[in-house]
Image (spheres, rainbow, N blue to C red):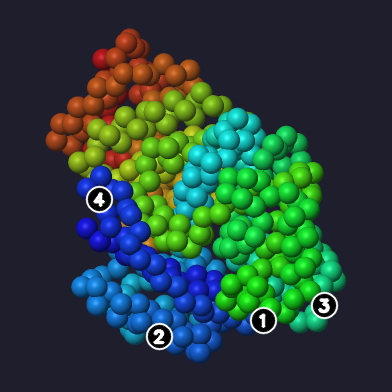
Amino acid sequence: MQVTSLHIGSSSVSLLIGEQEADGTITPVDFLEQPAPLAHDIFGRGVISPGTTERIVEIIQGFQKNLQELGLPPQGLTRAVATNILSEAANCDVFLNRITIACGISLNPIDDGEMTRLIYLKTRRRLMDTPAMKRGCALVIHVGPGNTRALLFKKGVIARYTSYRLGTHRTREAVHHSNAEGPALLELIRQHASGNLEQIRVDYLDEKIEALVIIGYEIQLMAPFLNKPGQPCPLKVIRQLTTEASKLSDYDLVRRYNLDYHTAEALLPAMEIAIAITQMLRLSEIFIPVSEYERGLLLDLLISKTLIGTFESEVLRATHILAHRYHSDPRHGEHVSKLCMHLFDHLHDFHKLGPHEALLLQCAAILHEVGSFISPRSHHKHSQYIILNSEIFGLDRLDITLVALIARYHRHSTPRPEHLSYADLNADDRIRVCKLASILRVADALERTHHQRVHEIGIVIRRDKMILKLKGINDVTVEQLAMQSKADLFTQTFGLQVAVETG
């Protein structure tokens, strides 16, 4: 079966055609790419110009003709996405509407959650060819057009994830009108990025980083000029190339390194950011993948939505790290999470939710008491605040909002239309919050003692009642009393009264 993925990137539009085997393996068959100055417009003007919009329409329509010639449906793309910086354009919706009308495709910007999934896929490949990432402490930096993301790996698993408002095209547009050249331009780039660079230094100051891996569109295009496949690039080599490149015009950069003009504009910020981070961490070399960034991205787009297993464990690991940061009782949070999953699995015919919602419920269960770090009083509201203002690897802003609300409703008031954040959700997401929060409330009631004494639960559904039989417990008075104040949302949502009995 043939599959296709389209990506409107910061400086180009690309299309990948692949052949998918029965086992899900995808082999690239053809790759098309054309330049377009999207990031230049967004970071330079705040809007996408009509000229750029029509240029992108023309590129996509050209790709569609190629698909038609190959006997593939021109509008039946498997995935069609746009760079996540698109949301920063004031006329984002106008642009998306124009693409939909002109090309007949549904286009979605990549959200934060999928961006981290894509970075994770790229990073997982680096685990195979960068031994230092398996044996010790490695930092992976993704320098994107608008943001830089950092993933800290310890013995091959993610120990920390952070994001910064620092990017190649964002920086380029900020220094564009300075008229600085050569070393002066590099110093200006460094000064502009200094605030975010200092934050990266502070965030990873106490880590003994053994290997630094930097990925990104521009810097990976330069990899063949910097290092041999699988070998690290000495800092002095990348510094020398960057100094030489700073003395060249965009025209000369295009000719020497076989770039398009839009990529050439962002090249120096990409290189200087990489140098600055390496120096800041007191390292002498960088691992830069030689694989083509855009081809890999298009291939990953076809599988990122189906990631299971390892990726979910990384999301939960990040959730546990956040809980630990706010001194939440790990045994209580983990046990409530297990009880939630037991209830979730047995009640599937009622809630009809999928694996992603199960993951959100687990995250909320682990984090539902982090608010006690601020104060035990109204800690459910403090939990909502902490989660809303945190980053969890693999979850986008909507996911984090849902997790925050599910945690917020684990006690006291049930969801109300006037509640902040909940009021901003659409009807489907409100229903998801109610379903998942009601399960969390029941699970939390069963763990009222915080002693993890409830393990085996028999679940019996009789008409309008759900009976929970707690095996191995002779006196369930505590759980019965807790359920009286916690089961209200479950009853309102599913129409089932909740009764607790001895097993």
What element does badge 4 sit on? Answer: loop
Labels 2, 1: front one:
1
Name the side, left or right, on which 409 lies relative to 225: left
Q: Which residue is drawn at 69% across and 37% down?
A: 210
417 and 390: which is toward the camera: 390
Kindly identify the amino acid type of the residue bearing the numbered disc 3.
Ala
Q: Which residue, given by chain and number where applicable, does mark 1 sit on?
A: 251
Residue found 65% across the figure and 60% down from its top: 225
Q: Which mark sits nearer the N-terminus, 1 or 3?
A: 3
Say which quadrant the N terminus sits in.
Answer: bottom left
Q: Mark 4 is on which residue type?
A: Glu
Q: Determine which residue is flagged by label 4.
A: 21
**419 or 232, which is in the foreground?**
232
Q: Earlier in the sequence, mark 3 or mark 4?
A: 4
Q: Residues within 10 Å of mark 3 (few under 14, many from 20)?
A: some
Q: What is the CA distance from the residue labelled 3 to the residue labelled 4?
A: 52 Å
Look at the numbered discs 2 and 4 and tell me whether their residues touch, using CB distance below 8 Å.
Answer: no
Figure quadrant of residue 262: bottom right
Mark 2 and mark 1 lie on one chain; the one further toward the N terminus is 2
| Marking on residue 180 | 3
Q: Which amino acid, mark 2? A: Glu
Q: In this view, does 180 lie above or below 241?
A: below
Crowd rating for badge 1 (residues with CA inside 10 Å; few <14, some 14–19, many 20+): few
